[in-house]
Every structure is written in structure tokens, then in C-alpha cells.
Image (spheres, rainbow, N blue to C red):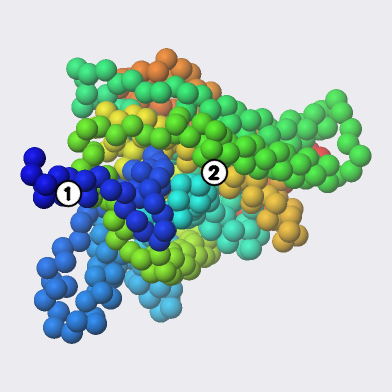
Amino acid sequence: MDPQAAAMEAGRKLPARHGGHPHGRSATARTAHSMSSSSLRKKSDAALVRKVPVAPLRPVLANLQEVFLGTKLAVLFPAVPLAIAAQCFRFGQVWVFALSLLGLVPLAERVSFLTEQIALYTGPTVGGLLNATCGNATELIIALFALFEGKIEVVKCSLLGSVLSNLLLVLGSSLFCGGIVNLGADQPYDRKQSDVSTGLLILGVLCQSMPLLLRYAVAAGEHAVAAGTTALYLSRACSVVMLLAYVAYLFFQLKTHSQLFEPQEADGDGADAADDEEPALGFGSALLWLILMTVVISVLSEYVVGTIEPTSQAWGLSVSFISIILLPIVGNAAEHAGAIIFAVKNKLDITLGVALGSATQISMFVVPLSVLVAWIMGVQMDLDFKLLETGSMFIAVLVTAFTLQDGTSHYLKGILLLLCYIVIGACFFVTRQPAGQGNNNGALLDVPSSSMSVQVA
């Protein structure tokens, strides 16, 4: 090899230097979430930008092109201004609800992209923390706005639906599609990551079951409590335990056992990873866009929360069905599509990282955080998700744990998970919500008031 070629080869092997980060892409801990979102991205064509005669405008236009056209979901971006226009000009609350849901789809994917861009400058630890907090930003923002409006049952149902959607719908459809496409090939995956996630999910179900079991034990006369707010205090204590467990999980994932959570890339992915080494945006630009996208998500989330009840009446569906089934499907559509794409490519470790990681993040971080934020706001939100909801989540975690216990997959496992989701969805579809019971903390959703159990108070 001549000296010039050797120098070029050495140059290709040098680590990228961005913002003082000496390790480039390899040090940003390419997580399952970031890889899932990247499957929906596309390279922007800079040819048109280079033809702009005004040179100072080219970087601005390139930045806009990368943010708004760098995703396959760009076609849904018009729903964002349409939703705002529908709200301002009062086109109808159903239109506002539907357009807001559609607008949240590309925004959620862009938040993931911008978080990954910032992680290129901050290193693996900060990048992992950003992913751990922003990975389900849409659900968290919707929950916070619902809390501000006192719609506690909407908060509970939307978070429960996100967990059910990830465990049964996303994982089930991924295993089914991956099994059909790879009929003649083995579909192994690392059980260690799934074991950690299912263990945390079981702890989450336990913490959410305690206030429910306490309420029924008191109602049956088997036990007594010192005050009517005992279940609320128990929920807050359990929420602190859940957050501590999540912090321990982050330390386990990012520090001591990070190798368990690093998705293995096939040989064909090496070029793609190399292409992604250079950040598409500067640090300041990515941070500014992340703030702007979060603000827009907040606006649309407020629209969704404010119009969910009129939409429920117009569509003839219960608020619980819309919150548990429709909101999670639309809000996580980009992430769900990425999980299915990697399952089809027989990369189940990435698929499991997306589905189980999101479910764990919602159950162990967003749910207890909502309880503690409600405490600060003076809203009495507890972990009592009621019998039907808690039983559905317990069964979903149990079925998922048994499905993933042998370390291999096939399409029948996907079918079973999907059928479980259909049965649970059908149960909430046939329920109807009594008038005036939608936002009361302590009232059972969709159960007539005459059949409600006695509360702890």
C-alpha cells in the first residue's frame, strides 16, 4: 500500500471529534431506542440547498431540511399547523383531537432524533440519561397536562395503555412479522436484558397492586387503616421505591452492565453507523430544536387532553378505551414501526430493547413521577388503577415474561401476544363510562356507581 493510501486509511480509523468528545459515535452508546428511530430516517438531499444563491441562507435551509425532511414521517407534519388552526378557528373538537394525534407522531420521532444528536456531544452517560427521560416525552407531557386539568383517570389509563401497547401490541406484531419473514432461520435473542426488564415490570405491578389490595381488604373488614388517606400515602411511598429502582436500573444499564443493553449490529450496519458518526446538527441548534419541539408537543398534548371527552361522546367510545388503546398506538407509532422493522431484519435484541425498554420506562419512571408531581400540585393521585386495569397489566407482564423465557422466537409467540391485546382491547371497548365519573379520583371507570366498592376512606 502506498503512503498516501495508508494515510487515508489511517484517517478513516481516527475517532471523530465533536465538541471535545474524543470517541465519536462509538462512545454515544447506540441504544435500541435510537436505532429504532433511525430506521425511519432518511438522508436529506442537499442539492437544492446548494443552488440557493444567497450563501448565508444555505446553513439555515440545510438545518430546516434536516429537521423537517429527514424523516419518513415528514408527510404528517402538516397535521401540526392544521391542529392549531382547527383549535383557533373552532373547526370542531373532534378535528382538533384527530389532527393533534397525527401531529404527535412525527414530533415524537424528531425528539428522539434531536436527543441522539445532543448525545453525540455529551457522551454516553448524559446521552443515556437524555434517552431515559425523553424516550417517552409524549406520554409524560400528556400525563402532566391531564393532571393540571384534574383528569386523573385519563392519566392512569393513558400510562397503562402505553405499557400494554409496548408489551402486547408492539412486541406481538414484531415477533409475528419477524417470524413470518424469517421462517427458515433461527431467531435468538439475549435473555439477560429481557429478564431485567420483566423483573422491574413485576415490581411495578406489585407497587400498583398494593393500594388496590388494601382498598378491598379494608372494604371486606379484614383490616383497618388509621386514616382515609392511608392508600394515598402508601401510593406515594411506593412511587419513591419505584423511582429508586429506576435509578438503580439506569446505573445498571449505563455503568456496571452496559454491555447487556448495547444492541449487536449486523455486518451490513457498519456503513450506516459510520455514516451517522458526523452530527447532522450543531449542539446549540439541536438543543434549540429540542426545546421548540417539546413546546409544540405540549400544545398538541393540551389539545388532546381538552378534547378527549367530546371526542368520546362523538365517536361513541369510552374515555378509557380512547386513553388505553388509541392514544398509545398513535403516540408511539414511530417507535413501534422501528421495532417491527428490526424484527423483520432478525435483530430481536433491538426490538426487545424498544418494547421492554419503553414499558419499563413508563411503569417505573413516568407513573411514579406523575404521582409525585400530583402530590406537589395538591392533586390526590394514587397508584390504585382499579381492578380491571391492574389485572390487565398483571396478565400482560406475566404473559410477556413466559413468552420470552426460552431465548428464541417464532411467529406463534407474536400471535399469542396480539390475541391477548385484542381481548383486553375488546374488554375496554364494551365498557361505558357513567356521566360525571370521568375525572373523579376513587371512582371506578366505566362501572355504574351502584356497583362501586367501598373506598379506603
Percent of width and height locating residue 24: 35, 50
Residue for badge 2: 362
Percent of width and height locating residue 150: 66, 60
Up-down: is 450 above or below 259?
Answer: below
> Which residue is the extreme one toward the top?
406
Percent of width and height locating residue 424: 48, 33
> Which of disc 2 and disc 1 is earlier in sequence?
1
* Residue type at numbered disc 1: Ala
* Residue type at numbered disc 2: Ile
> Which residue is the extreme one toward the bottom?
54
> Which residue is the extreme one toward the left?
2
Dot 1: within a 10 Å radius of its alpha carbon, few (fewer than 14), some, or many (20 or more) residues? few
Considering the numbered disc 1 on the image, is that residue within a helix, a strand or a loop?
helix
Residue 115 in sight in this render: no
Considering the numbered disc 2 on the image, is that residue within a helix, a strand or a loop?
helix
Residue for badge 1: 7
